Image (tube, rainbow, N blue to C red):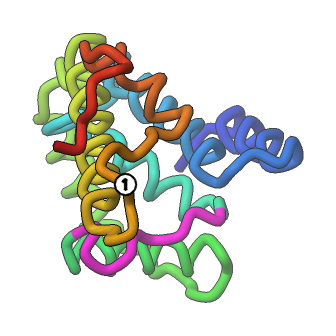
């Protein structure tokens, strides 16, 4: 169950017209705080993020499930279920035994996955994958010139990845 403060922050973000991913970010922050405080652990930073996104969907954030090819079928199915539950289209069953088992399993996981270093590593990896997929999409466009211009957001990413803005990534 998410904290009341987290739900209030997400609603405030929604009123401010911010995107569903920004609203869901509040739930991810809460999950990372929980791991850092030692309430439970996580196998990886991605797991902590996934738990936060699932809680956001269940709390009613309009964060759509990932599309086909973006995630495993099992992950997509789980996200669809959480999304429908949050939007009031499905009534979730209470499963105390499963809930207890999940809680016990998470308590056995390490806490170091929410450390500053682990989250930094995850962030860098995610950013580099975004740049790579952007370059692949630019290559596949037949009418593109040899040197496509990077969008403003992509150019801001380059120094963080240790690349000069003049470097052409798509070759």
Q: Quadrant of residue 69?
A: bottom left
- Which residue, given by chain and number where applicable, does mark 1 sit on? 145
Q: Nearer the viewer, residue 145 or 67?
A: 145
SS at mark 1 in the image: loop
Instruction: Please state the horizontal and vertical placement of residue 23, each as a whole percent of the image.
Output: 65, 45
Rendered view: 67 above or below 11: below
Instruction: Please state the horizontal and vertical placement of residue 49, each as a whole percent of the image.
Output: 36, 42
Q: Residue at x 34, y 74 (%)?
A: 78
Instruction: Please state the horizontal and vertical placement of residue 35, each as a whole percent of the image.
Output: 32, 26
Q: Residue at x 20, y 42 (%)?
A: 106
Rendered view: 90 above or below 86: below
Left or right of 165 on screen, residue 25? right
Q: Residue at x 55, y 54 (%)?
A: 56
Left or right of 23 on screen, residue 111? left
The magenta stretch is 62-71
4 in the magenta segment: no
Count the marks: how many? 1
Rendered view: 134 above or below 99: above
Rendered view: 98 above or below 47: below
Main SS type for the magenta part? Answer: loop
Q: Residue at x 37, y 49 (%)?
A: 51
The residue most toward the right is: 15
Q: Nearer the viewer, residue 160 or 20?
A: 160
Instruction: Please state the horizontal and vertical placement of residue 37, each as a whole percent of the image.
Output: 37, 17
67 in the magenta segment: yes
Q: Residues within 10 Å of mark 1 (few under 14, many from 20)?
A: few
Q: Nearer the viewer, residue 156 or 28?
A: 156
Left or right of 128 on screen, residue 95? right
Quadrant (top left/top right/bottom left/bottom right) for the C terminus? top left
Q: Nearer the viewer, residue 91 or 153?
A: 153
């Amino acid at each position: 169950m998410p904290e009341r403060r987290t739900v209030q922050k997400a609603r405030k973000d929604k009123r401010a017209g911010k995107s569903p991913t920004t609203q869901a970010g509040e739930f991810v922050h809460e999950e990372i705080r929980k791991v850092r405080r030692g309430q439970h652990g996580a196998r990886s930073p991605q797991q902590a993020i996934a738990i936060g996104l699932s809680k956001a969907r269940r709390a009613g954030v309009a964060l759509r499930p990932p599309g086909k090819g973006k995630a495993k079928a099992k992950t997509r199915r789980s996200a669809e279920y959480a999304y429908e539950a949050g939007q009031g289209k499905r009534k979730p069953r209470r499963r105390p035994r499963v809930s207890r088992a999940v809680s016990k399993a998470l308590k056995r996981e390490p806490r170091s996955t929410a450390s500053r270093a682990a989250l930094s590593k995850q962030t860098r990896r995610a950013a580099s994958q975004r740049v790579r997929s952007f370059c692949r999409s630019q290559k596949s466009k037949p009418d593109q010139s040899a040197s496509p211009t990077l969008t403003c957001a992509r150019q801001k990413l380059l120094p963080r990845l240790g690349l000069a803005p003049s470097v052409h990534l798509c070759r």
